[in-house]
Image (spheres, rainbow, N blue to C red):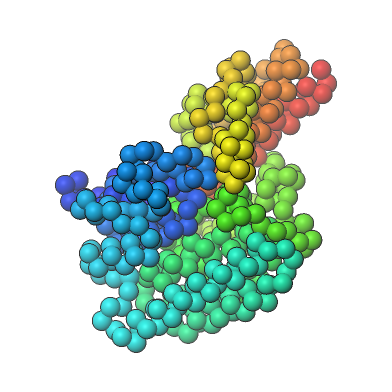
Amino acid sequence: THNDATLRLFGKKESDVRVVLYRDHAAWCPYCQKTWLLMEEKQIPYRIEKINMRSYGDKPDWFLQKVPRGLLPAVEIDGKMMTESLQIMQTLDQMFPTDNMMLPYGDKAKMGLAQDLLGLERELFGAWCSYVFQPGERAKGLFESTMSRVDKALGATPGPWFLGGDYPTLVDMQYVSHIERMLPSCLYWKGMRIRGSGKYPNVDAWFAAFEERPTYVATKGDFYTHVTDIPPQYGPGQPVDAAAPFIPKIDGSAREGWSLPLPPLSGDSLEPVLECWNPGEEGARHEAALKLSEGGEKVSKFACRVYGGEVGKWRIQGGGMRSELADPGAPSDERFLEDVSTALRHVSNALINGHESCAAALKADLADAPKARKEAVLECLDYLRLRVSVPRDMSYPAARQLRAHIQWVMDAVQADAAAA
């Protein structure tokens, strides 16, 4: 499973592909995620077409001809289009029977339980919306009591999954994409820690079981990505005073977690990473360097949008309901392209070799640059740093290293500009 994949065969021939999945390009959409996850778990051969969400781009005309309302996800099965994630998942499960069927169709009692649990998921979603997107904490009790019911339901069956068994079912997938977003949003806007709080041990075990699965980890976003992708989809979260210690740690407005040296990741981190998916500092740095080098000059041009004159324009045209991070089609000002490319080469060098050994070379390159150019590079790097997205661009451990190494170069540029 990988965000960059456009064709998944699972050992079959390309001629066996009957399904096209239309999902969002940035991997922000929770409904796309659960559909994507089901297809990976069942190993259904499929093609992938990535489409913008309205929150960060315009949809192509050819897609709107197929899906006039532009809904995502959508699937095309044998040439027929279908939308609505739950219906898609149920249809795919029955059209492509496997050993890991996603619902217990022949067991009336278990099917009744599955329907009850799907209803509880909608209750949890509603309680989350009432809590996070409304001022104050009036809905806190409702959210906590509903989450406790979910935890109890998970504890009622053997193993980590809602329906028991050895693998996650459609019920688990229906829950996981939104609970994944509840963890950072409740922490960021309400100061409520769900995972690791001790209140929901069965939810903790269930989430850890998901995180042991490569299929899930490849689709999973990080806390920063979610607190920036949630507002344009659901509306702005409403912060309370208790959230103040967590906001800067998640969004980079404070140095902790976004600058070097970074504390090691573990299962006990604010944003936990299981040992099985922790590549260590060097491994994470090298992944980030690889992804940065693969982007080449495109990354530098993207950063140079800051001076192209249209940053923020598309969002304003949409009445402010579009993502603050999205500037589709914004031009770059290539006056600073060489300077930004030089700065990013130093980021790559530090990621590969360690920043301590690269400081002298960075300082030497900065020595002769005029102050105005240094200030321009600062703005371009900051624009890029805030737009590193998980899983679209790379894994969370790698994104964390890239953001911090960009900040390291920014600190050096800023210090040099101040001394000029």
The relative height of residue 403 versus residue 157 in the rendered view (above or below) is above
Image coordinates for residue 53, horizontal then vertical, percent: 47, 46
Residue pictured at 31% horizontal, 53% vertical:
75
Residue pictured at 32% horizontal, 43% vertical:
65
Image coordinates for residue 354, horizontal then vertical, percent: 62, 35
- Give the left or right position of residue 351, taking residue 219 as reference: right
Image coordinates for residue 242, horizontal then vertical, percent: 77, 63
Q: Nearer the viewer, residue 166 or 333?
A: 333
The quarter of the picture where residue 260 lies is: top right
Image coordinates for residue 316, horizontal then vertical, percent: 62, 38
Residue 300 in sight in this render: no
Residue pictured at 53% horizontal, 77% vertical:
150
Residue pictured at 63% horizontal, 27% vertical:
306
The quadrant the C terminus occupies is: top right
Q: Nearer the viewer, residue 158 or 36?
A: 36
The relative height of residue 277 versus residue 374 in the rendered view (above or below) is below
The relative height of residue 360 versus residue 65 in the rendered view (above or below) is above
Q: Nearer the viewer, residue 374 or 106?
A: 106
Q: How many marks?
A: 0
Residue 109 in sight in this render: yes
Q: Nearer the viewer, residue 244 or 126?
A: 126
